[in-house]
Image (cartoon, rainbow, N blue to C red):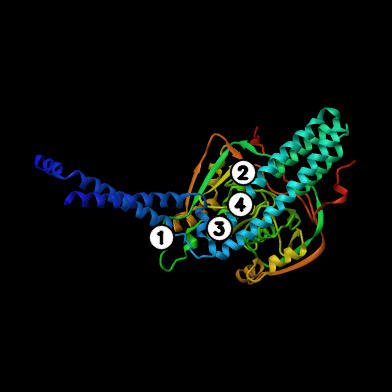
Amino acid sequence: MHRPFNQVSLAAVTLLLGALVVVQLRSQAGSAGLAALSAQELTVLVANLNTRNDQLRTEVATLQRQLDDLVSGQSRGETSVDRIRADLSRVSAWAGLVPVTGPGVTILLSGPVAGANVESLVNELRNAGAEGIAIAGIRVVPGTIVGGAPGGLTVDGTQIASPFSVDAIGSSTTLLGSLTRAGGIIAQLAVTNPELSLTVTPVDRVDLAATQRDLVPLNGGPRL
Amino acid sequence: MIALRARLRAIPTWQVTLGLALLGLGFLIAAQLASERPRVRYTTQERAPLVETALGLQAQQDDLKARILDLRDRIQTAERAGEGSAELVRQLNQELERARIAAGLIPLQGTGIVLRLEDSIQPAPPDGNDRDYLVSAQDIRILIEELWLAGAEAIAVSGERVTTTTAVIDIGGSVLVNSAYLAPPYHVTALGPPDLYDRLSASGGFVDFVRARGERFGIRISFATPESVDIPAFAGTVNLRNARVAPSQSPAP
C-alpha cells in the first residue's frame, strides 16, 4: 500500500518543484522590470519610447542622407570639405563646443536655492528636449556640476549670486508646458523653496556661450 | 554513535528523496516570495498589451541605435577616404574626430571604475515608503555628479552614454536614461584617472550618499576596478531643430 502512495507524493512534490524553478527563472529574466510597472506608468513608458524612436528614425534618415551625399560626391571626384564642415558644425553645436542661438525659455531664479534643486531643473529641461542649456551664462555640458547649499551656489566652482537665470534653447511651448505643468518641477521647487521666486519666460532668442571645458578625455581613447 | 548510524540507515530511501525535494521546494518558495518584494507586481488585464507594446518599441529602439552606430562608422570611413586629397580636409577630419569624442559619439576605453546599484532587500517598515528601498533616478544622478567631481571624464549608465542632453528620470520603480528603459541592477561605468575610486570614496558627498541610501535603506552599492573600462558611444539623435551656431562662430569658408 505504501509504495504507490510514496511514488505519488514524490511525483507531486517534484512536479511542483519543477514548476517553481521555471517561475523563478522567468521572474529573473529580461522583462522583469516591466512587471513592476502599473498600467499608467507603462503608458508613460510607451509614450517615451515612441518619442525617442521617432527621434532615432529622423537621425537614421539624416545620417543615411549624409552618407549617400558623401559617397556620391566622392564618386564624382568632389571634395568633401563642405560636408565635413557641416557635420563638424552640427556636432560642435550639439556638444556645447561653440556658441549657439535659438528660441527657448529663460528661467529667472531669485532667492536662496540649493545646487541639487538647480540640477533637478536642468534634468527636467533635458527631459523636455532642451538642445542647449546655460546657468548664469555657463554652458552646461557633461561634467558641469551645480553645487552648494542655498545662498552659496556654485557652477563648475564659480560662485553664483542671486538673482541668476537658467537659459535653454528648444521649443518654447514644449519647455514651458513641461516646466509649469501641475506637479512639475517649478511647482515642486516652489513648495520646497518658499523663499525662492521662479519666473519662466518663453523667448524668441536665447544666446548660449561655448563651454570653457576641454571634453576630450586624458585617461582613455577611442576603443579600437 | 553506532546506534545513530543504524537508525539513519533504517530510514527508507524514498523518505530521504522526499525530504530533499521538500527542502528544495521550501527554498524556492522563499526565493520566489523574496523576489516579489519590494517591487509590486500588477496583474490587471490592460497591462498585457502595454507590456507587449513596450517590449516591441524597446526592440525597435535597439535596432535603430545599432543602425545609427553603423551609419556613423560608415560616414567616418567615407570622410577619411578623402583625407589625402588636401591638407584642409585632413585638418577638418581631425577637428571632427575631437568634436565627436567630446560629444560622446565615439566609444572609449581607458582606466576607470564600475559601480553597481541594486534595490534594497530589506523589507520596508509598515510606516515606511517602499520607493525609498528602490534605486531612484536621483540616486543615479547623485552618483554621476559625484563621479564628475572625483574626476571622471566619461560616464555610461547600463550602456547609455551620459551626454549633454541626458536626462535621468523615474518611471515606476525603474529609470529612463536617454529615454531608454533600464531595469535594476544599474551599472554606472566611469572612465577617469587610475585613482578615481580613491578620490570618490574620499568625497564627503559620496560618503553621505552611501550613508543615506546604503546604510539607512539598504540600497546595495558595490564597485569594481577592472584594468580598463569600456564606455559605449551615444546612440541617439544629435539633430538640432531650434539651435543654430551663432553666426560669428560658423567655421570660416
Q: Nearer the viewer, residue A155 or A102?
A: A102
The secondary structure type at the circle numbered 4 is helix
Q: Earlier in the sequence, mark 2 or mark 3?
A: 3
Read off the residue under disc 3: B51
Number of marks in the image?
Answer: 4
| Amino acid on which the number 1 mark rests in the picture | Pro
Do dots 2 and 4 share one subunit?
Answer: yes
| Amino acid on which the number 4 mark rests in the picture | Gln
Q: Which residue corresponds to the image point at 41% horizontal and 57% vertical from the top-left?
A: B122
Q: Earlier in the sequence, mark 1 or mark 2?
A: 1
The secondary structure type at the circle numbered 3 is helix
| Amino acid on which the number 2 mark rests in the picture | Ala
Read off the residue under disc 1: B123
Given contact means CB atoms under 8 Å apart, are the residues at marks 2 and 3 in contact?
A: no
Q: Which residue corresponds to the image point at 78% horizontal and 32% vertical from the top-left?
A: B80
Read off the residue under disc 2: B152
